[in-house]
Structures are given as C-alpha cells and as structure tokens.
Image (cartoon, grey):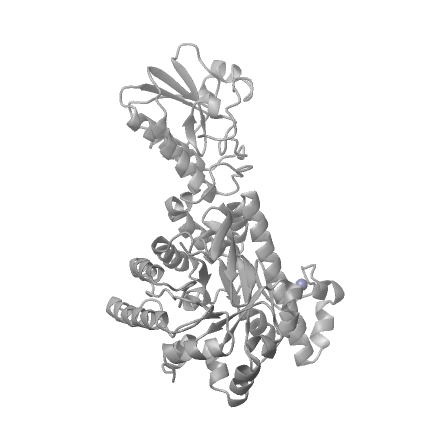
Amino acid sequence: MREHFEIQAQDAAGRIGELRVPRADVTVETPALMPVVNPNLITVDPARFPEFGAEVLITNSYIIRNDDDLREQALDEGLHEMLGFDGAIVTDSGSFQLAEYGEINVTTEEILDFQYRIGSDVGTPVDIPTPPDVERERAESELEETQKRLAAAEGVETGEMLVNAPVQGSTYPDLRESAAEHAYATNLDVFPVGAVVPLMNEYRYGDMVDVVAGAKRGLGADAPVHLFGAGHPMMFALAAAMGCDLFDSAAYALYARDDRYMTVRGTEHLDEMAYFPCSCPICTEHDPEEVRQLGDAAREELLAEHNLHVSFAEIRRIKQAIERGDLLELVEERARSHPAMLDGYRALLDHADQLEETDPASKDAFFYTSTESAQRPEVQRHRERLARLNPEGNVLLSEGSRREEYDASWRVKPPFGPYPRELSQTYPLTAETPDRMDRDGYEAAAKGVARLAALNPDTEFTLAHKGWPASALDYVPPRVDVVDLTLQSESVEDVESESADESDGGSSEE
Ligand SMILES: [Zn+2]
C-alpha cells in the first residue's frame, strides 16, 4: 500500500484523494492542478497561487540547474523561499528538454540529488519520453532505458522527498500497462503518464484515453496519477474520469502570451472577443476592449490570471461532480465542445468495464443526456447483474403493465433492459431518460433482453415494447416473442402509471 495517497470519494474511475507530501508538510486534495512556473519567465507571482486555489506547483529543476544565478539562489535559499510558495513543489527533470532537443547533460542520480538539495517535495528522474506512433521496437527499448533509470532513482538518497515514476510506452496501450506495472512495483511514489502532450496538441483525445487506460490497468488504485502536460480545462473532466489525479498547466501562461483566453469549451482569441463569458475577478472588472488596450506585460498577466481562475473553477466543478456522482454527466457536457472531445468520451466508454470497477453502485440519479449515455458503466453493470436473477416459467418483459397470464411481469426500460419490478426504485433504474429515446438506448435495452434470454435457456420470454426500431429488435433472439404495444390499442390503454405497480426496493441493487 502507498500510504501517502488516500481516496475519499469515487465516481466512474475519477476520485477525490488526499496526497500527503511529507517534505512540504502539506496534504494536497486531488484532483489538483499544478501551475507550471518557468523560473526565467514568471507571469503570475507564485506567492499569489493560493488565491486561485493552487496547493502545489511544478517547476523545472533542469532549467534552474543550468542557470548560474538560479542554481546558486535555489541552493542557497531553497525553492520555497525562491518562489515564495509554501505549498508543495514538484520538480521536473529535463525529460521535456530531452524530448525537444534530443540531449541533456544530466543523469537521474545527479538531477534527483540536485532536486533534493534545492528542497523539492516531489522529484523526477530523467525518463525517456517516447513520442506517439514510433516503431514498437523503439518504444520497447526506450522503455527499458526508462526502467533502468527508475531503478537508479530508487537508489538515490532523497529523504522525505517523494519521487515520480513516469510511465512511458508511446501509443501502445499494452506497453503502457506493463510500464505501469513495473513502475508500481518500485518504491517510488507518484505516477506521471508521460509524453501525451503531442496527442493533446493534435486533439487526439481518443488515443490519449487509450494510453491512459493502459497505464491505469497496470497501477494499483492507491497510485496517484499525474497526466503530464494536460493543461487545458476543456479536458480536465475527461482526464479525471479516467482516474488522473494531478494536472499541470503551462498553458495558462503560454496561452496568455499569445492573447489566448481559455474556457471550458475551448480557446478564444482576445482580438475576437466582444464579451468575457466568465465571472472571475478579471472578467467582471474588465471588458475585452479594455484588456486589448493594455501593454504587453499587463495584458499577459490579466489573461494568465483569468486562465488560472477558469482552470481552478473547473477542478472544483469536477470535485463537486465526483462528490455528487455525476462526473460522467459533466464529461458528456464537455464532450459537446469539440468533436475530438467527443472521441475522447467515446473512447472512455469503450473502457466502461474498467470504469465499472470503481464506479459507486448507488448514486443520486442517472441522467440520460446523449446517445453515449447508453454505453455508460451503469448500463453494462445492470446487464451483468442479470446473471444474479432467476426468472422462471413464462415471463413478460414489458414497457407497459403487468399481465396475469404470465408467471412474472418484469419491466423493461431503455437503455438498461429488463428487471424485476421491485428493483424499479433502485439506482440506476430510477434514471431520468428522454421520451424521445434514441436508437442506441433501444439497442442497449435489446442487448439486455438478449442476455437475459441467453442466461435462462429454459425460461420463456415475451418482450412487449413501445415501437422499438428494427435495429434494436435485431438483437432480440427469435425464441423471444415480441409484441409492439403501440400497434395494440387495447394493451396501450391498460398501461398503468409507473409507480402504481412498483414496490420500494430499497436504495441499492445489492
Ligand atoms: Zn475570467
């Protein structure tokens, strides 16, 4: 067990956690956003970060080590004093510079020792950030090298400093998984999923999800996961739902330098803005025209401050969603902001079995708000739980009322499929679904019917549905009798109100 990380609440694979950082003597609540501080180019004074909600920041020890003045100052004063920040400080190692320039002049042992001496709270070895889409051979050999460096990191005397164990493996989910298993088996502490920035820069959120899902499969639940380089608030909810706990944002400053204004739906250019769609202090006190008139430095600082505000607001929104159990509803909303985000969400749902492992069995409400809702882990879980039920004799599965001539009368509800009426008041069958259900919802329900029939070969089933499309009915095996209630006026008339025939089944399916 990794005792420095404790999970407080979960939803999908997302979690609220407490990361104890002993050297800084602070506990960071996750998901947490770490503003990146370039010590050569301070946009917002780190001493002010707590105003925005930052409990942890990340800076680059390689840059500090290679600059005479910064190095002396850091060794002399320590990072906390140098940056004026009392929270936890994570230091990167130069791996990013290695990826950019192909060469750096420091070993894992040297950089970890340096990080320790300048007072870092979480250090990082020099791993090899293998880019996406390389030949498998290269991904494997670079991973081997990264693993040697993790072994070297284990041998460095670092006191109470936590140490990152980066997970590489390019765009091969199985390599990411084995890399994660290896990293998890070390005595290192925090697990960054590395080299995903190129995927995010190219809006390949579907591929990013597959890479992270691979890494998550290889890590224990008590492993704090850092999605390295994920700095846009648009994708925080998606990343959190995959089980990422730490994000770092260089974007807040880099975007501001280019007059770019971040929102949870994407990025706007200051020149094209007539209004600020935000209620942070910057946006309520200024309008875009005013900010355009400012000098470069002032404009950059105000935009960076807004970018931090909007980013931290999204982190709080995510925490509230996890607490409330509607994180996937938030991801669905965000998925509507860009087609690539929709790909990311769809890829996430391809891993519904993985999400299902940590998703709470009971929550407040399930809102069916998109065709993707039909693939949510709750739908899959319901279908799996059908194996626990034993329908016998002649069983009606109906969107309408009970019928006396059957041995049992079950409900059927898209997207979940069939269930005994006594479960009607349990999560997720209390779901709010639209009257105009979509094809995916009907198809998911039909798959539930098919599974129930397959599990109970000696039971006779009749499905009484209300106008399901042929694409859904195609999933229903021929041995199930099918009646369309919308074609039978008599049956439609005797449909009872939903609550009339349901007993209260308690608050859980268990
Ligand atoms: Zn704002």
Question: Does any portion of residue 470 appear in the rendered image?
Answer: no
Residue that extends furthest to the right in the rendered view of this protein: 285
Residue 271 in which image quadrant: bottom right
Residue that extends furthest to the top in the rendered view of this protein: 405
Residue 190 location, x and y as percent?
A: 43, 63
- Quarter the C terminus occupies: top left
Q: Residue at x 42, y 42 (%)?
A: 375
Question: Does any portion of residue 151 appear in the rendered image?
Answer: yes
User: Which residue is more in the foreground, 279 or 2?
Assistant: 2
Q: Residue at x 66, y 70 (%)?
A: 48
Residue 408 in which image quadrant: top left
Q: Is residue 234 left or right of residue 184?
A: right
| Relative height, residue 24 to residue 359 (above, below) | below
- Quarter the N terminus occupies: bottom left
| Relative height, residue 80 to residue 339 (above, below) | below
Q: Residue at x 51, y 50 (%)?
A: 331
Residue 3 in which image quadrant: bottom left
Residue 264 location, x and y as percent?
A: 58, 58
Residue that extends furthest to the bottom in the rendered view of this protein: 68
Residue 477 location, x and y as percent?
A: 30, 27
User: Which residue is more in the foreground, 208 or 41?
Assistant: 41
Q: How many marks?
A: 0
Q: Quadrant of ligand 1?
A: bottom right
Residue 347 location, x and y as percent?
A: 40, 52
| Relative height, residue 365 to residue 306 (above, below) | above
